[in-house]
Image: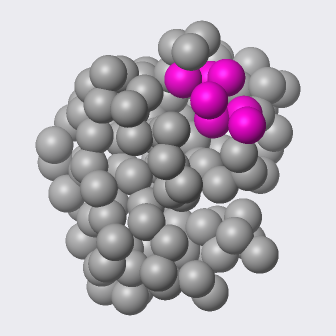
Amino acid sequence: MNLSIPIIICDENEEVRRLIKEMLIKNGFFHLVEAHTREEVTQLTATNHFIIIHKKLLDENIKQQILRTKHYLIVAQNDDEDTAKLSAVFGVKHLISFPYTSRVLVEKINSLLS
């Protein structure tokens, strides 16, 4: 488990960002950065961070930046039609669907960091 890696939490919804942040802090992750616009995401993905991003913020530019790294997790809804398309582009291992627990989130992050 790499607790020192900076994590960017990218979601338009402040409550969702706060919930994810609380989940991560409770599990020992403290280097957390929040982004809520595509512009912020674009600026932050240029650095060496693990990225948790809601699918709504993905555009072509951000997609290309994210695909250059293996350190990302895309949050989507299981019953959403776009989730199948995201799976094809990014791979199933890089997706997590609502609802999820902090244990599932941390396990997913750790599997992608190892």
Asked if the magenta segment contains residue 89, the reply would be no
Q: Position of residue 1 (x, y in %)?
A: 62, 87
Asked if the magenta segment contains residue 67, the reply would be yes
Magenta stretch bounds: 62-68
Q: Is residue 2 left or right of residue 32?
A: right
- Splitting the image into 4 quarters, where does residue 86 fall? top right
Q: Position of residue 34 (x, y in %)?
A: 26, 49
The colour style of the image is one colour
Q: Position of residue 61 (x, y in %)?
A: 56, 15
- The mark tally for this picture is 0
- Splitting the image into 4 quarters, where does residue 69 fall? top right
Seen at 43% across and 27% down, the residue is: 42
Please identify the residue farthest to the top as the structure is shown.
60
Q: What secondary structure is the magenta-colored segment mainly?
A: helix
Q: Is residue 111 left or right of residue 27?
A: right
The correct choice, above or below, for 90 with respect to 23 in the image is above
Quadrant of the rendering where the C terminus is positioned: bottom right
Q: Position of residue 72 (x, y in %)?
A: 61, 49
The correct choice, above or below, for 30 with respect to 109 in the image is below
The correct choice, above or below, for 35 with respect to 30 in the image is above
Seen at 38% across and 32% down, the residue is: 43
Seen at 47% across and 81% down, the residue is: 4
Q: Is residue 45 left or right of residue 107?
A: left
Frontmost residue, 48 versus 58: 48
Frontmost residue, 52 versus 2: 2
The answer to whether residue 83 is visible is no
Please identify the residue farthest to the left as the structure is shown.
14
The answer to whether residue 46 is visible is yes
